[in-house]
Amino acid sequence: MMETLAVALGGAIPSPRVACFLPSSSSSSVSSLTARNSVSLSYSASNLTLHRNLAAFQPPSHLFSCPKSSPHAPKNSRKTHVFLPHLVASLEVEQTYIMVKPDGVQRGLVGEIISRFEKKGFKLTGLKLFRCPKELAEEHYKELQSKPFFPKLINYITSGPVVCMAWEGVGVVASARKLIGATNPLQAEPGTIRGDLAVQTGRNVVHGSDSPENGKREIGLWFKEGEICEWIPVQEPWVIE
């Protein structure tokens, strides 16, 4: 015959049960087993508290949630939480003109240069392959007319096709200048376009506007009306019938 021995632990938690299957003639063994199990299954108050603390895990809070402050906490200790997308949306979006120069086009670096701006998070709003006439090059670099290297610069820009690009984004002018690097590639930091891809000033691969005002001016020079696109989110994929 089998008997079930229940060992009561007491307290607020359910009492664990220990089942033993012994012959009916082993009453003395049952008594000793009951005593041993009563000792081994007893819970102290500290163990019970630890069990409750481990079971009381709280769900993770949301990244942008504002935690509730204690009503007894001083007012100056409560922090103001700003939702980052709202902050970004309040900043002014700039435009800049980026041009891959003839040496960059001939070396097949157009995709590399575009990818760096895309990975940064800027929007490409204008793009074209263009053979620059002399008059446009002189207007673009008119601030350098007094420099002795001006004629060579004009001959260089008009020597082959260039890739004209218009980019927009928050702080895009200053950020683009950092991505491009110093005018002299030997002084440009590793990781910049000129620091990685060029070795001399006369063949420094890419041009970028140096101010938001020049960005708008240069985009107006190199792009005609209607060549700058507005971003429209794609709602549905195209269906080819």
Image: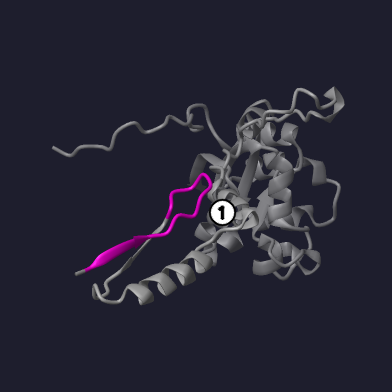
Is-magenta flag for residue 198? no
**Nearest the eye: 52 or 126:** 52
Element on which disc 1 rests? helix
Residue 158 on image: x %, y %: 61, 53
Q: Which residue is depicted at the point 71% across and 30% down?
A: 81
Instruction: Name the image colouring.
Output: one colour
The residue beneath circle 1 is 51
Q: Judge left or right: residue 206 versus residue 33.
A: right
Say left or right for 131 vs 14: right
Residue located 78% across and 69% down the image: 186
Does residue 169 appear in the picture of this structure?
Answer: yes
- State whether residue 203 appears in this view: no
* Residue 8 is inside the magenta segment: yes
Residue 103 drawn above or below residue 76: below
Residue reaching furthest to the left: 241
- Nearest the eye: 167 or 20: 20
For the residue pair 122 and 210, the one nearer the viewer reads as: 122
**Is 62 above or below relative to 157?**
above
Q: Start and end of the magenta stretch?
A: 2-15
The location of residue 228, given as percent across then percent down, is 51, 32
For residue 94, side relative to residue 60 (left or right): right
Quadrant where the N terminus sits is bottom left
Q: Which secondary structure type mostly characterizes the magenta part of the structure?
A: loop
Q: Quadrant of the C terminus?
A: top left
Residue 19: x %, y % from top left: 32, 65
